[in-house]
Image (cartoon, rainbow, N blue to C red):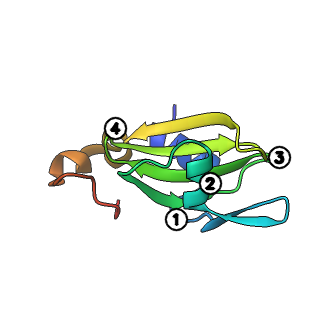
Amino acid sequence: MANPREEFERRYGPLWSGESAVQIGGTTHEIEDVMHRAGFGFEGLRVIDAPRVEAGRFAVRFFDGEERHIVCLEFDVDFNLLGEHRVHIAEWLGDAYFETEFQVHCPMDF
């Protein structure tokens, strides 16, 4: 059985391999705007990218520092949430998690 990070990357690709904006119906939406429209415009979330997903679906990835998760939200053309996939940073980093000195939030260079 693959670990959660491998499954997440198999589905969405490596972090930062997605786009910096989302194209919906011929309109370009910045990721921060998409997150706000989907109800995730909170302080403390660090945007990563917008990975490609199946037709009719769109996605954004971010790091939730409060919950300490890498998150991918999938939504439709009307910004309705279709799915949310999370991997805790400890599962993401594996043994390196215990060797990393965290300040307030996890560093984004994992």
- Between 95 and 66, which is closer to the camera in this rendering? 66
Compare marks 2 and 3 and give the one earlier in the sequence. Answer: 2
For label 1, the residue is 16
Q: Secondary structure at mark 4?
A: loop
Amino acid type assigned to the residue bearing label 1 in the image: Trp
Q: Residue at x 60, y 68 (%)?
A: 20
The Cα atoms of the two marked residues, 3 and 1, are separated by: 22 Å
The reply, left or right, for residue 72 in relation to residue 98 is right
Where residue 96 appears, x then y in whole percent? 24, 51
Number of residues whose C-alpha sits closer than 10 Å to that of mark 4, classed few (under 14), some (14–19) or many (20 or more)? some
Q: Secondary structure at mark 2?
A: helix
The Cα atoms of the two marked residues, 2 and 4, are separated by: 20 Å
Q: Residue at x 33, y 42 (%)?
A: 68
The reply, left or right, for residue 1 in relation to residue 34 is left
The image shows a total of numbered marks equal to: 4
**Label ID, residue 67:** 4
- Between 49 and 12, which is closer to the camera in this rendering? 49
**Label ID, residue 56:** 3
Q: Residue furthest top?
A: 1
Number of residues whose C-alpha sits closer than 10 Å to that of mark 1, classed few (under 14), some (14–19) or many (20 or more)? few
- Between 91 and 81, which is closer to the camera in this rendering? 81
Q: Is residue 3 visible?
A: no
Q: Residue at x 35, y 51 (%)?
A: 44
Where residue 19 appears, x then y in whole percent? 63, 67
**Label ID, residue 34:** 2
Location of residue 57 with respect to 25 vertically, above or below: above
Are discs 2 and 4 less than 8 Å apart at CB?
Answer: no
